[in-house]
Image (cartoon, helix red, strand yellow):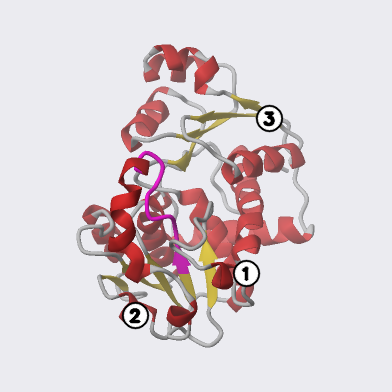
Amino acid sequence: MAELSGRDLLSLADLSSQEIQELLQMASQLKSRQLQLRCNRVLGLLFSKASTRTRVSFTVAMYQLGGQVIDLNPNVTQVSRGEPVQDTARVLDRYLDILAIRTFAQAELETFANYAEIPVINALTDLEHPCQILADLLTVKECFGDFSGLTLTYVGDGNNVANSLMLGCALVGMNVRIATPPGYEPNPIMVEKARSIAQNQAQVVVTNDADGATEGCHVLYTDVWASMGQESEADNRMPIFQPYQINEKLLTIAHPQAIVLHCLPAHRGEEITDGVMEGSQSRIWEQAENRMHAQKALLASILGAQ
């Protein structure tokens, strides 16, 4: 069992390779019901961005552990009226046992963690999406058994998912290729951090060549071309990103046994075709389910569930 008692998870880089492997093993055991854990604690969800999978999976995971969840909608709390982050953090610290935050700026998340003594989990920021990648890695492990020798290719926007995928793949020793249009590459600091973590255990490649990045890959992954907060750019991005669509033609370049992942929600016909999404190589729905199992393992480990 991963020993994360009382710790924050603000970035995947907060975890070691061994800790990720232990979390994935625990998630697998919880999913198969080989392991059953309980903790009577209270999780707060403070989400400034819309959410389906993250909100529901965290809620169900906590309920299944025997805990409770409070949905702290910013629109009905003093956060919406400008209460300083540090004030809200110090108050919630006295009510809750753990807090998951979904917001825009990574700095806001870090400020919360600095002022709250309870554990804080990054449920998504513009920089990272670590909980999503735990579910992604669990899905890959279920399909292939191990990460050694595998290559994951992400095509599309170099967003928070791309940033965290690089870190996650580097930590488990899986090669990762990020293919984006010129000017839409992932955060360069995150690229260097991933390469530093990977060292000689895996390759971290950033390119503008979608076909080259896809050749022989075992996992083909994409996300929306315009993330939350970028909706006004969507129309302008369409022609730029069209060559980076996951379609039947691109899938033929990947390994014959390759799987397709998408963190959802998907804009069918844009970043991924309907045929690929519903095709035999898609593992998108298993990936979505694994959000709950991975987060249950994370909550159990941080809260010391027994």
Against 155, residue 83 (above or below) is above
Q: Position of residue 14 (x, y in %)?
A: 41, 48
- Mark 1: amino acid: Glu
Element carrying mark 2: helix
Q: Position of residue 172 (x, y in %)?
A: 46, 67
Q: In the drawing, does residue 144 fall left or right of residue 60?
A: left
**Which marked residue is nearer to the observer: mark 1 or mark 3?**
1
Residue assigned mark 2: 211
User: Residue 304, can we see it?
Assistant: no
- Labelled pair 2, 3 in contact (Cβ < 8 Å): no
| Label of residue 278 in the image | 1
Graded by Cα atoms within 10 Å as few (under 14), some (14 to 19) or many (20 or more), the crowding at tag 2 reads some
**Which marked residue is nearer to the observer: mark 2 or mark 3?**
2
Principal secondary structure, stretch drawn in magenta: loop
Residue segment shown in magenta = 221-230
**Residue 222 sits inside the magenta stretch:** yes
Residue assigned mark 3: 41
Dot 2 or dot 1: first in sequence order is 2
